[in-house]
Amino acid sequence: MGILDVDVPNQEEIAAVLENARGRLRLWARRTANATAALLLNCVAVWLFLDVGPWHAYWQPFGQVFLLLGMALLLVFVYCLSLWMAAWFLLRDLKKAYS
């Protein structure tokens, strides 16, 4: 065996890798959708406590908590979106290479 001998994957291995990549893409798409929904709901909650919202009198006890929660949810959204995009790019590259 020389250095240039490369193991070429068979069709079953390629199908398994593609299915795993599709599963990973579905997983992160679902998590990204959930993170998006949570972020949007939190934005609505923050809006209710702003000057234009009906509950502005309760900004100190509740509004600031929702604002901090929104900052945390933004980080979760960006994390999920980046992993979803990475899974999408990986699946795209695998399809180009093996299909």
Image (cartoon, rainbow, N blue to C red):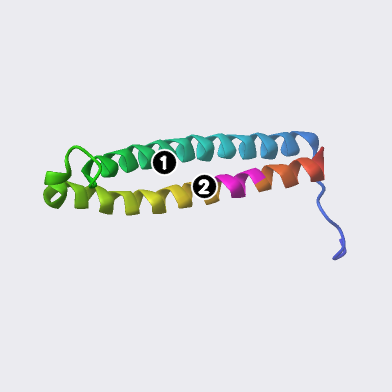
Magenta span dominant secondary structure: helix
Q: Position of residue 1 (x, y in %)?
A: 86, 61
List the residue tagged with mark 1: 35
User: Where is residue 71, by image quadrant?
Assistant: bottom left
| First of labels 2, 1 by sequence position | 1
Mark 2 residue type: Leu
Nearer to me, 4 or 74: 74
Mark 1 residue type: Ala
Position of 74 with respect to 56 (left or right) is right
In which quadrant is the C terminus drawn? Answer: top right
Q: Looking at the image, is 26 positioned above or below residue 8?
A: above
Q: Is label 2 in contact with label 1 (beta carbons under 8 Å)?
A: yes
Q: Residue at x 27, y 44 (%)?
A: 46
Query: Which region of the structure is painted magenta?
Result: 84-88
Q: Position of residue 32 (x, y in %)?
A: 48, 40
Q: Position of residue 28 (x, y in %)?
A: 52, 40
List the residue tagged with mark 2: 81
Secondary structure at numbered mark 1: helix
User: Where is residue 5, by image quadrant?
Assistant: bottom right
